[in-house]
């Protein structure tokens, strides 16, 4: 095993954690976010929503099952850096094709190991998400490293979806033996691979389209529904897509949004979005469905949220609606549904990847909405 050099995790408030270099050596910058998932490191690394973020894993042992082609959520690793306590020295899994460290090296991802990830997490919980840098094999002084971190762009106001959206449309068809019943235009703001697969299993032919897609291009496809995906950056920077959603709502085309798509629906309806102190990132987050009273254990990855009124029906130019789901950890809005037009969204990830499948019913809800666009959500959920 080659001897590892010292490495430093440097936060923009001047706090520095010393560890050892891991994966690629060098320096990298991003927003420091922590994920509490015990599994799913490969899905996290390849989720485009983490673009320009450095992810701290609270689970101490990472890399135990190596990496494989099936568990990727996109064609590449999007995180800017990866912070772990104890990378596994072996990869033990029948599907493993490569070690995690080798995959990170091959993907030019700078990592750091041997740092107290729990102390870093507690610090971020107390101080909030902030800019961060990883420096390994560096000649810089600690002061020079802090200065470099403070020169990097913050997440607030960041327009990042253009970096991750598909350049060309592509189609995900239902698997063999599943009849195609609906066609959906999925606007790719950083879509995870598990999402169109979850829809295709229900008989939906998913047309994955670039974020620049227009309403006319959607109407040319003669779709039964429009889907807005997860993705990186600040929803307040997504003006072009907010306008598209408003035109879809006016046409009353059945609409479903996940995570970034939920925030953009919220903004299209006229609500503000705001930055959470340190976000929700993990796969055991309790959310209550206010329609059924059921509690779901869900997968989350979001740093922003929608400021919508929770106790009452709200009224917008597109009709009335309500908050459909809230987090049981901190009461953050986790779902919206319109009553008079066919549109709903959730802040969390019903496609999971990784995480529990408690929320997979939401894809069926989208199918029912396309089957009965005129009756709206209230009757569908009854
Ligand atoms: N996973 C996502 O879609 C994230 C949405 C948004 N970028 C946020 O951080 O809240």
Image (cartoon, rainbow, N blue to C red):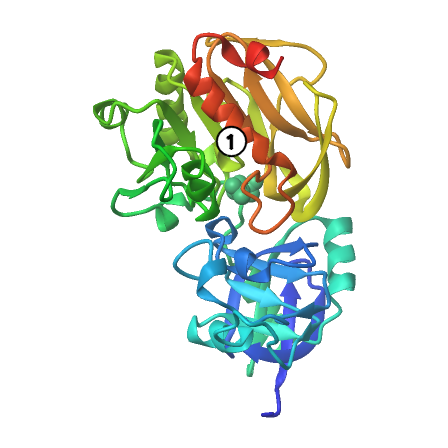
Sort mark 1 into few (<14), some (14-19) or many (20+) by Cα contacts within 10 Å: some
Q: Is residue 56 above or below residue 209?
A: below
Which residue is depicted at the point 44% across and 36% down? 199
Q: Is residue 100 above or below residue 186?
A: below
Which residue is depicted at the point 57% across and 74% down? 135
Q: In which quadrant is the C terminus drawn? A: top right
Asked whether 25 or 101 is in front, the reply is 101
Q: Is residue 229 above or below residue 312?
A: below
- Is there any visible trace of residue 324 in the rendered image? yes
Asked whether 72 or 314 is in front, the reply is 72
- Is there any visible trace of residue 156 in the rendered image? no
Image-quadrant location for residue 133: bottom right
Quarter of the rendered image showing ligand 1: top right
Q: Position of residue 365 (x, y in %)?
A: 53, 24
The answer to whether 2 appears left or right of 121 in the picture is left
Residue to which mark 1 is pinned: 363
């Amino acid at each position: 095993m080659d001897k590892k050099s010292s490495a430093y995790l440097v936060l923009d408030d001047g706090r520095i954690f010393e560890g050892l270099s891991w994966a690629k050596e060098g320096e990298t910058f991003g927003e420091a976010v922590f994920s509490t998932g015990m599994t799913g490191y490969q899905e996290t690394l390849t989720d485009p929503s983490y673009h320009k973020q450095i992810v701290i894993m609270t689970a101490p042992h990472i890399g135990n099952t190596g990496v494989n082609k099936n568990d990727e959520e996109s064609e590449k690793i999007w995180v800017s850096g990866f912070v772990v306590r104890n990378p596994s020295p072996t990869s033990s899994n029948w599907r493993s094709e490569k070690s995690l460290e080798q995959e990170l090296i091959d993907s030019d991802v700078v990592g750091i190991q041997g740092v107290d990830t729990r102390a870093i997490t507690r610090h971020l919980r107390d101080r909030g998400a902030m800019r961060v840098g990883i420096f390994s094999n560096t000649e810089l002084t600690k002061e020079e490293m802090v200065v470099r971190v403070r020169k990097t762009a913050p997440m607030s106001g960041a327009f990042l979806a253009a970096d991750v959206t598909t350049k060309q449309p592509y189609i995900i068809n239902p698997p063999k033996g599943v009849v195609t019943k609906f066609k959906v235009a999925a606007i790719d703001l950083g879509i995870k691979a598990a999402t169109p697969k979850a829809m295709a299993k229900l008989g939906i032919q998913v047309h994955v389209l670039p974020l620049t897609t227009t309403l006319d291009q959607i109407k040319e496809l003669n779709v039964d529904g429009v889907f807005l995906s997860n993705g990186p950056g600040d929803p307040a920077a997504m003006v072009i897509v907010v306008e598209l959603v408003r035109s879809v709502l006016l046409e009353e085309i059945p609409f479903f949004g996940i995570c970034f798509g939920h925030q953009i629906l919220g903004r299209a309806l006229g609500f503000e979005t705001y930055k959470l102190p340190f976000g929700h990132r993990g796969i055991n987050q309790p959310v209550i469905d206010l329609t059924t009273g059921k509690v779901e254990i869900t997968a989350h990855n979001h740093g922003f949220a929608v400021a919508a009124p929770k106790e009452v029906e709200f009224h917008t130019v597109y009709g009335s609606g309500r908050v459909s789901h809230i987090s049981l950890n901190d009461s953050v809005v986790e779902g919206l549904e319109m009553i008079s037009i066919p549109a709903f969204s959730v802040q969390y990830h019903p496609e999971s990847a990784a995480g529990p499948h408690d929320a997979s019913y939401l894809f069926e809800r989208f199918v029912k909405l396309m089957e009965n666009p005129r009756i709206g959500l209230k009757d569908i959920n009854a």
